[in-house]
Image (tube, rainbow, N blue to C red):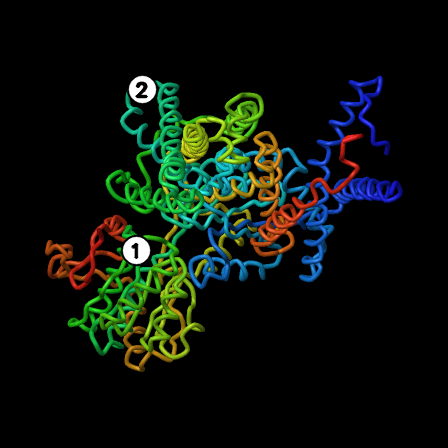
């Protein structure tokens, strides 16, 4: 018995000593990062969410192919102090010189704080928030996805038989409302009799409610669905399962709907990421504020799926060429839901008109309430 | 091993050794459990084709290996200490309260709201004091209500606190996206900011906020309350056997109400620090799961308030290292959650080992 006791003690001592040796001995063995440019990217959710994060992750993967560029990634970083900590960790432990912070809530205060703390590092955030009062080593980049939603709407408007289209939306905030309006304008342009029904789930990611909303819209007679939620997977799969057509959002959902997928509104962050890496490589300054749509190749439409008819493809291609050439989406007459005039007959709003950034209304022809 | 109770001449020394021997059980067994879980996790890594040695050296480096890593760790552990106290205090009375998240969210929300009319005229110190008190009051009422339901209506505190935390989150979302929304921020619904001049700065020379100090003080105070006062004694008796406590004439209802209110007050205070030290306003970022991680911390610390501090730092360190592990080994984010889960299970299993090793028994006991 004494021997057993002795053994246990020795074992503990031994394993304790082993652990200490392990932790101190290998500290120096962690490989240092290679020379060149290290870029850190933070995601708020998983990289394979078929949505917002995946759109960035696809671009990050393309960026990794650029010689001399190392990409370090962190997923599921919540919009808390964890953001600042992860950024600082990327800078101090990995030597990152450029940080792409991809979630809306990362900007204030975390990106701003870090930009002040590390003036030698460049910070770019994926939403139009930077102002000239903010640090000059910070900045914004964003894509006007509503242009791609407009093209979706053109294709969707020509694909409906019931003249009812469904839109599952997250929160009734500016960018979401603008995407709904642009989609509806596309629909109305090719099919004035059609309406777009909206259901807000209230959350960026709430799969159960997204499925309920998709089913409710289909039950109400909608035969084409699209959405603006973080991960459109559930909506697209529900539509496919119920035998109705769908348009995607954020990233490619084409593999989820082999029968009914028409096309989708996708970001093309790769354009920006590669451009910035090249600029830093040449020692050039990065822009502080940049946004664009088809004109700058910041957004794209998913390759057409089996749900797209030749007629819809032709109309959507033409509409995309028009927007790329600068033709406006908001062409009057357009009324808001409450009947007030948004754009008068004969007038139009530029696709980058600043007042569209503050969209807090839905247009006539959209069924559903913001509140 | 002579089985006599005759005290040795060196009575004091012998007793001290015995005490160390007995209490070392509470250190050695958890450490053993950690080693076992690390070994199991290494097998998991090998199955994934990754090198465990690299993994653990990265965890060390990312959590504790550099000055920055330590700050990173402490920043992440601050809310966990207060959130864990919300579990540990009712646990002494035999109650499993898992709804600290709700008290944290509502406490932070209330602190942000009460500051809105004050920021224009009130001095910073007064604003912050009122915010802290209101957050504790709201958190205390929220979890205190759980205690009330338990004692007077016989409702299971685990279920009611969990369900109440969903209600709390809904209340936050309702007001932040409605009546109390800051109109200048169209895309991230938040309350009006309290302004940078009213924020609590970090502990000088670090990036760690004062919530860490508050949590540590609270943990020590709760240890004293639970182990060195008649209140704590009565609470532990209640936790051991409610009927016996009632038969002794202990005020069980009062004990439950006070303990749950205290617990909620600490969770509310964690919410206050999230608002006053980090976000400067209340929004959905308050719903970060600290209340739920606090459950893990409290159980790992065996509901001992003092032990909560090192356990929270340990878990904070693993979380801090999670990013480095992701980046260097290209492992998914869930990897450190697997490690945490393994540790939790192995530690719970190791509970059955207490009292089984003669080495920890007092001589002659």
Name the spot of residue A134 as percent of width and height, x first: 40, 37
Determine the CA span between mark 2 and mark 1. 38 Å
Image check: B253 left or right of B207?
A: left
Badge 2 and badge 1 both on one subunit? no
Which is closer to the viewer, label 2 or label 1? 2
Residue B283, position in %: x, y? 36, 41
Name the residue furthest front.
B247
The residue identified by callout 2 is B122
The N terminus of chain B appears in which quarter of the rendering?
top right
Quarter that holds the C terminus of chain B: top right
Dot 1 falls on a residue whose secondary structure is helix
Chain holding disc 2: B
B360 or B214: nearer the viewer:
B360
Q: Residue at x 37, y 35 (%)?
A: B148
Name the spot of residue A44 as percent of width and height, x first.
46, 51
Q: Residues within 10 Å of mark 1 (few under 14, many from 20)?
A: many
Residue at image location 56% in from the left, 23% down from the top: B224
**Quadrant of res A312:** bottom left
Instruction: In this rendered view, identify the residue nearer to me: B82 or A286.
Output: B82
Identify the secondary structure beneath mark 2: loop
Residue A250 placed where, x, y %?
A: 40, 61
């Amino acid at each position: 018995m004494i021997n057993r006791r002795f053994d246990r003690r020795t074992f503990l001592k031994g394993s304790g000593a082993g652990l200490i040796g392990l932790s101190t001995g290998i500290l120096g063995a962690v490989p240092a990062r290679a020379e060149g440019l290290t870029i850190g990217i933070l995601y708020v959710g998983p990289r394979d969410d078929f949505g917002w994060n995946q759109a960035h992750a696809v671009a990050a993967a393309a960026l990794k192919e650029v010689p001399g560029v190392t990409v370090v990634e962190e997923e599921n970083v919540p919009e808390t102090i964890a953001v600042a900590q992860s950024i600082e960790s990327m800078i101090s432990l990995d030597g990152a010189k450029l940080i792409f912070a991809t979630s809306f809530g990362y900007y204030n205060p975390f990106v701003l704080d870090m930009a002040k703390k590390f003036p030698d590092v460049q910070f770019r955030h994926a939403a139009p928030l930077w102002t000239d009062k903010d640090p000059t080593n910070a900045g914004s980049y964003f894509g006007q996805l509503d242009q791609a939603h407009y093209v979706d709407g053109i294709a969707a408007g020509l694909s409906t038989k019931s003249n009812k289209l469904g839109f599952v939306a997250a929160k009734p905030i500016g960018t979401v409302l603008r995407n709904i309006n642009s989609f509806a304008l596309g629909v109305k342009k090719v099919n004035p009799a059609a309406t777009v029904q909206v259901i807000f789930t209230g959350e960026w990611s709430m799969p159960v409610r997204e499925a309920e909303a998709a089913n409710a819209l289909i039950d109400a007679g909608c035969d084409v669905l699209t959405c603006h939620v973080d991960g459109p997977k559930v909506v697209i799969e529900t539509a496919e399962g119920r035998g109705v057509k769908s348009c995607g959002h954020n990233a490619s959902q084409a593999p989820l709907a082999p029968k009914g997928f028409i096309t989708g509104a996708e970001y093309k962050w790769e354009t920006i990421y590669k451009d910035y890496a090249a600029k830093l490589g040449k020692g050039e300054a990065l822009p502080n504020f940049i946004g664009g749509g088809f004109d700058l190749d910041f957004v794209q439409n998913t390759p057409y799926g089996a749900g797209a008819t030749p007629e819809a493809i032709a109309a959507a291609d033409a509409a995309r060429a028009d927007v790329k050439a600068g033709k406006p989406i908001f062409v009057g007459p357009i009324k808001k839901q409450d009947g007030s005039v948004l754009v008068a007959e004969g007038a139009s709003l530029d696709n980058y008109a600043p007042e569209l950034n503050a969209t807090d209304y839905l247009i006539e022809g959209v069924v559903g309430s913001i509140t | 091993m002579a089985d006599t109770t005759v005290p040795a001449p060196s009575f004091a020394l012998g007793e001290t050794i015995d005490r160390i021997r007995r209490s070392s059980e509470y250190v050695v067994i958890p450490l053993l459990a950690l080693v076992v879980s690390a070994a199991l996790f290494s097998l998991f890594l090998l199955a994934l084709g990754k090198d465990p040695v690299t993994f653990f050296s990265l965890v060390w480096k990312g959590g504790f290996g550099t000055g920055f890593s330590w700050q990173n760790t402490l920043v992440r552990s601050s809310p966990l200490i207060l959130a864990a106290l919300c579990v540990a205090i009712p646990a002494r009375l035999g109650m499993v309260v898992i709804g600290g998240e709700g008290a944290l969210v509502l406490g932070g929300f209330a602190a942000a709201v009460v500051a809105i009319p004050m920021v224009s005229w009130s001095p910073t110190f007064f604003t912050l004091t009122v915010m802290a008190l209101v957050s504790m009051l709201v958190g205390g009422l929220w979890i205190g209500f759980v205690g009330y339901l338990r004692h007077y209506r016989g409702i299971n505190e685990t279920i009611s606190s969990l369900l109440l935390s969903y209600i709390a989150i809904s209340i936050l979302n309702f007001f932040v996206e409605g009546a109390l929304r800051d109109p200048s921020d169209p895309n991230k619904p938040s309350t009006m900011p309290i302004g940078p001049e009213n924020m609590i700065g970090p502990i000088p020379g670090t990036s760690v906020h004062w919530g860490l100090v508050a949590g540590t003080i609270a943990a020590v105070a709760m240890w004293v309350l639970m182990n060195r006062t008649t209140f704590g004694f009565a609470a532990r008796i209640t936790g051991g056997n409610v009927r016996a406590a009632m038969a002794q004439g202990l005020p069980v209802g009062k004990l439950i109400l006070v303990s749950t209110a205290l617990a909620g007050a600490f969770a509310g205070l964690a919410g206050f620090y999230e608002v006053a030290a980090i976000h400067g306003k209340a929004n959905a970022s308050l719903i970060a799961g600290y209340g739920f991680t606090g459950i893990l911390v409290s159980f790992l610390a065996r509901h001992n308030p003092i032990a909560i501090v090192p356990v929270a730092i340990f878990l904070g360190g693993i979380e801090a290292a999670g990013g480095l592990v992701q980046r260097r080994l290209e492992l998914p984010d869930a990897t450190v959650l697997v490690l945490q889960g393994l540790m939790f299970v192995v530690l719970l299993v190791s509970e059955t080992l207490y009292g089984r090793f003669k080495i920890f028994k007092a001589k002659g006991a």
